[in-house]
Amino acid sequence: PNDGYDLKSYSYVVAGPDGTVRTGRYPIADNCRSPLVNGSYAAHCGGFNGGSIGVSWCGMKGSDAAAGRFGHWPITAAQLHRGLAFSALLAHDLGLDVANPAQAFTHREAWELHRVRGTVNH
């Protein structure tokens, strides 16, 4: 993950082939302020960041889903499982219902379910 985008934009980043969880630049609390103060928050979901936690898996650069190419850095099984386990722990500790799309969703679901039309989350 790079500090200029990944660690600046997400609360947590699941990186490397082993799935090491890295803490982003801004803590979860920065996304819970109302109103968000001085732009000090993890801007991970194009206009839908307030009160949310961004968890990202690093990888897939150069991928093309339509062509079936996963890029030079595909997400590994270990990375997937560690990231999901970490997300489950966050959900448990914070009392989030992962079956409720208002509480747990992907960028695509922000676009489709919540009609968030950010420039980068589609």
Image (spheres, rainbow, N blue to C red):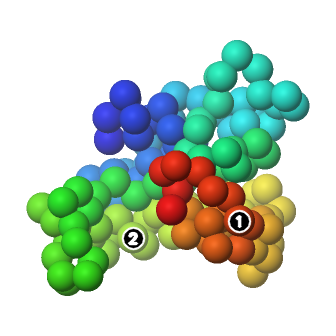
- 67 with respect to 122 (left or right): left
Q: Amino acid at mark 1?
A: Arg
Which residue is painted at 32% across and 34% down in the image?
A: 2
Quarter of image, res 117: bottom right
Taking depth in this image into account, of 9 and 25 the one nearest to the observer is 9
Residue 118 position (above or below residue 104): above
Percent across and percent down for residue 33 are 82, 30
What number is the disc on residue 29?
none
Q: Residue furthest top?
A: 38
Q: Which residue is disc 1 drawn over?
A: 115
Percent across and percent down for residue 118 are 59, 51
Look at the image and tell me in which quarter the N terminus lies: top left
Q: Which residue is disc 2 drawn over?
A: 80
Percent across and percent down for residue 25 are 52, 28
Q: What secondary structure is found at the residue carrying circle 2?
A: helix
Residue 26 position (above or below residue 74): above
- 96 with respect to 25 (left or right): right
Which residue is painted at 83% across and 63% down in the image?
A: 95
Residue 34, visible in the rendered structure: yes
Which residue is painted at 67% across and 45% down in the image?
A: 47
Image marks 2 and 1: residues in contact by CB distance under 8 Å: no
Dot placed on the residue nearer the N-terminal end, 2 or 1: 2
Give the CA distance from mark 2 to mark 1: 27 Å
Residue 64 position (above or below residue 107): below
Residue 88, visible in the rendered structure: no
Quarter of image, res 60: bottom left
Taking depth in this image into account, of 10 and 43 the one nearest to the observer is 43
Crowd tier of the residue under label 1, counting other residues whose Cα lies within 10 Å: few below 14, some 14–19, many 20 or above: few
- 3 with respect to 116 (left or right): left
Q: Amino acid at mark 2?
A: Leu
Q: Nearer the viewer, mark 2 or mark 1?
A: 1
- 65 with respect to 34 (left or right): left
